[in-house]
């Protein structure tokens, strides 16, 4: 084996870290809490971006770019927002360095202090709504639907690659509407875009729902979320879409003249997903041999490893491989031939398994003679010998099948992990086993906080479209009446 | 007219600003020197990104992401680099805000001071080479060819939208090679990629050459550049590619074991273009009516304006337009039907002219009767009536023709602006008229500085592949012998 990966059963957290680092996805940088996203990891993120971006544009959103820096005073404008975001963040106070007059290298020039400190954006609602003020005057200017792909910084104390880093990459959509109904519809549309992307592209069977008031985004009237389940039984919030009401419009004085000639405040949403999705992808599907990438996101979908002794054999095998590569690429698939002559085939097999490539083909002189090739699928680790004849179509079918199988496996795991729990004793026992618990809750923030304190479990969401939740019952903690079950779990 | 644009002859600088702001490309933000790139401007930048990104990948480069912040000490490592970049930059000194105990809003928490200040990257050589140290051990690890699309910050005192902003967007490629020859070839390959992109996509007839030692990138042994000529006769550096020798490898101790088992320092290049290209695009092609966008970069290539009185006429015209739109979109062209019912056609014509849309179609009831459409091309402002029959193919040809015409017009302007100048008196006179002056120079930094002091002109580049430059002569300033003419101009 090229690189040893910790077993999930031995140390799940170390297994995750091994996958991120040893599969060349990302690594820690010299700057506390900031990661380097390596080319192989970034290629996956790029695929996510491309697919999501097309989906956003399909809804009418357009990309734009707003400043990295936010004047400190902006954070004071929206009262709840400031409590949520203006704490741990990177503060720019000076704009010049100089040579130390005492010869101690480079120092901050004390005379270059900014009049007002600038905050590196932790999220951009404030600077964007301050801009929208100039864009929006009449009902004709609405809706405004901007998205930006950018970096943001939140000074997290405990960081983990992709899951929680001081700097991360994300997209943030910010929309402005004439009515509450339109804004609510946009919030709903975007959480559905995220759910579709998670299910179809990432093979993640997410649960869609509303956050409880206590878990809402700072400044939101409603936060919708997609919640994914990781293999260790913990939940991961994979994307959120917020209905912000008129809070930001009021804070930044953004009004429009409606068709009747009256001035009204604008209604807002925001929605985002981040490089955290990379963490979800790794933890939902990986196994003890490494990553398992859904074909829709795999930078390399098919890898081919030639096996040979003589130059003649080498050439014969490569010939066939290049033919097949060309045929698959013509159909839009990404193929890599691993022809490195300094490594043995077994080493290469392990490396591409670690990197999660969905399909691996190996071909040697005997295969050439027999007109066959060895096909290994990453998700099940099965290997079979296939005739070369008509292979490209079968590989395309196989990629489809792998995409579906990865989803179905995750779905089966999730469904087996959802349990209805009706008593507090049972809850405390079951939460230790991980997974999603569907329970009645009395709807108060106090009960929610108590449950979290005692068990570290939080309400992941109040599921929508789930007939199974809509029933009368009693709160597991207080016994007070409840009209709907909600989803509890421990989470990342 | 919708929005008045200043004439170039009245005030070129105000004309530029009018185009940027009134064509909805970008605007100043609340943060000094930082711009907001609006959706229409960002759509052009996205097209640039997509095309360049494909070209980079074609050369073998891969995208990655490195931290926004650079520890202050990194800037002290490469002596020349520090002088060039560690001056005007954004310095992060704290990581927390808090409520002022005296009730004066939000203040920086004095207890959250960073041990070492962090600099918001003005360019990433230092942090990237610090990372490459861990990636590169053997000749098998080389070359490493990473590119990143990101934001950078240089605290410029005088800013102009796109041309010089405190924060801007760019791409920076950073490559590591086993030999000087390979690194030089990469530097050369990338400046050629930029030149090809400038010529074929941006319709900019750039001059390729080497920077004089005094104009090189901080830390580079050679800087190659593409230089474009703006309509006011000033040059604009549109992209650079640097051969960095072993400077960064030595500063960050990046060595590899060669095939003979000996340790050597790695050879480096870096190369980049930025949102400055937007400024070049605007100034090279725009006219007094607004932007003139080359079809290859126009977010909307064809705009259609319906003309009607009755609903019946409206429907008949729209029917035809949707048919045509579908046919053009099927061939990969972007089409917009401007069906806003609150604006007159004349207003719409002016607006799309301002926004530089290459082709405008207008169609009214009489056109329907006659089977015709009015076709207006933005570059020449010509209008002709065309039969509807077979129109889509002729529009595709027209877009091609416009792309070429915009380039040829810029080329003719540039060629007419290049003059050989052989005396100092003539130089001082000619430089006032703008354009590129091809002159002999004695090769010293001192002469270069003097010429700049006296005339504000700099050596834009020492052109390559230019037979016209390769001749013996005497320096225009000192009269000392010279073996090649170089290109002088005033510049942005």
Image (cartoon, coloured by chain):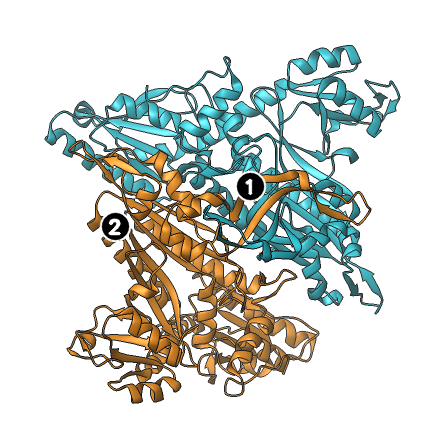
Chain colours: A orange, B cyan
Asked if B130 appears above or below B154 in the picture, the reply is below
* Residue where numbered disc 1 is placed: B167
Q: Is residue B325 left or right of residue B129?
A: left
Q: CA distance from mark 2 to mark 1?
A: 31 Å
Q: Is residue A130 left or right of residue A92?
A: left
Please state which of residues B436 and B374 is positioned toward the viewer in this rendering.
Answer: B436
Q: Please identify the quarter of the rendering in which residue B290 is found.
A: top left
Residue B432 drawn at (x, y percent): 66, 13
Asked if A296 appears above or below A283 in the picture, the reply is above
- Mark 2: few, some, or many residues within 10 Å (few <14, many ≥20)? many
- SS for tag 1? strand
Q: Residue at x 31, y 43 (%)?
A: A249
Which of the numbered marks, if any, corresponds to residue A26?
Answer: none
Residue B326 drawn at (x, y percent): 28, 43
Q: Residue at x 84, y 27 (%)?
A: B446
Q: Please identify the quarter of the rendering in which residue A236 is found.
A: bottom left
- Mark 1: few, some, or many residues within 10 Å (few <14, many ≥20)? many
In this view of the protein, can residue B66 be seen by the observer?
no
Please state which of residues A372 and A58 is positioned toward the viewer in this rendering.
Answer: A58
Q: Residue at x 50, y 38 (%)?
A: B31
Q: Identify the subunit bearing mark 2.
A: A
């Amino acid at each position: 084996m090229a690189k040893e990966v910790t077993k999930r059963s031995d140390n799940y957290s170390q297994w995750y870290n091994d996958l991120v680092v040893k599969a060349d996805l990302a690594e820690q940088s010299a700057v506390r809490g900031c990661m380097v996203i390596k080319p192989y990891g970034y290629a996956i993120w790029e695929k996510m971006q491309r697919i999501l971006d097309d989906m956003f544009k399909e809804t009418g959103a357009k990309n734009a770019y707003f400043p990295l820096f936010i004047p400190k005073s902006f954070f004071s404008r929206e009262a709840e927002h400031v409590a949520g975001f203006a704490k741990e963040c990177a503060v720019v106070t000076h704009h010049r360095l100089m040579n130390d007059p005492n010869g101690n290298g480079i120092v901050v020039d004390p005379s270059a202090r900014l009049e007002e400190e600038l905050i590196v954006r932790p999220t951009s609602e404030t600077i964007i709504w301050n801009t929208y003020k100039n864009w929006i005057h009449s009902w004709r200017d609405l809706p405004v639907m901007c998205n930006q792909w950018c970096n943001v910084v939140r000074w997290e104390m405990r960081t983990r690659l992709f899951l929680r880093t001081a700097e991360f990459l994300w997209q943030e959509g910010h929309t402005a509407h004439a009515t509450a109904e339109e804004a609510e519809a946009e919030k709903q549309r975007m959480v559905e875009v995220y759910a579709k992307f998670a299910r179809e592209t990432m093979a993640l069977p997410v649960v869609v729902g509303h956050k409880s008031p206590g878990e809402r985004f700072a400044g939101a009237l409603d936060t919708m979320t997609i919640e994914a389940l990781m293999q260790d039984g913990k939940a991961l919030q994979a994307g959120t879409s917020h209905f912000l009401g008129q809070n930001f419009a009021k804070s930044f004085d953004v009004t429009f003249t409606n068709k009747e000639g009256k001035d009204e405040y604008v209604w807002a949403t925001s929605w985002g997903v981040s490089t955290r999705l990379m963490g979800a992808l790794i933890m939902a599907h990986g196994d003890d041999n490494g990553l398992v990438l859904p074909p829709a996101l795999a930078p390399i979908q098919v890898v081919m490893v030639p096996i040979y002794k003589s130059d003649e054999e080498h050439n014969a095998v490569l010939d066939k491989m290049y033919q097949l590569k060309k045929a698959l690429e013509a159909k839009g698939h990404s193929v890599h031939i691993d022809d490195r002559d300094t490594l043995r085939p077994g080493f290469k097999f392990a490396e591409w398994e670690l990197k999660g490539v969905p399909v691996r083909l190996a071909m040697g002189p005997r295969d050439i003679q027999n007109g066959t090739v060895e096909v290994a699928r990453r998700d099940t680790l099965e290997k079979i010998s296939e005739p070369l004849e008509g292979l490209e179509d079968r590989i395309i079918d196989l990629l489809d099948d792998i995409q579906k199988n990865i989803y179905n496996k995750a779905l089966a795991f999730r469904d087996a992990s959802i349990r209805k729990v009706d008593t507090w004793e049972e809850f405390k026992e079951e939460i230790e086993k991980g997974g999603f618990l569907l329970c009645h809750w009395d709807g108060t923030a106090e009960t929610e906080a108590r449950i979290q304190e005692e068990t570290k479990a939080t309400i992941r969401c109040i599921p929508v479209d789930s007939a199974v939740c809509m029933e009368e019952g009693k709160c597991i903690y207080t016994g007070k009446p409840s009209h709907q079950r909600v989803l509890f779990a421990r989470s990342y």
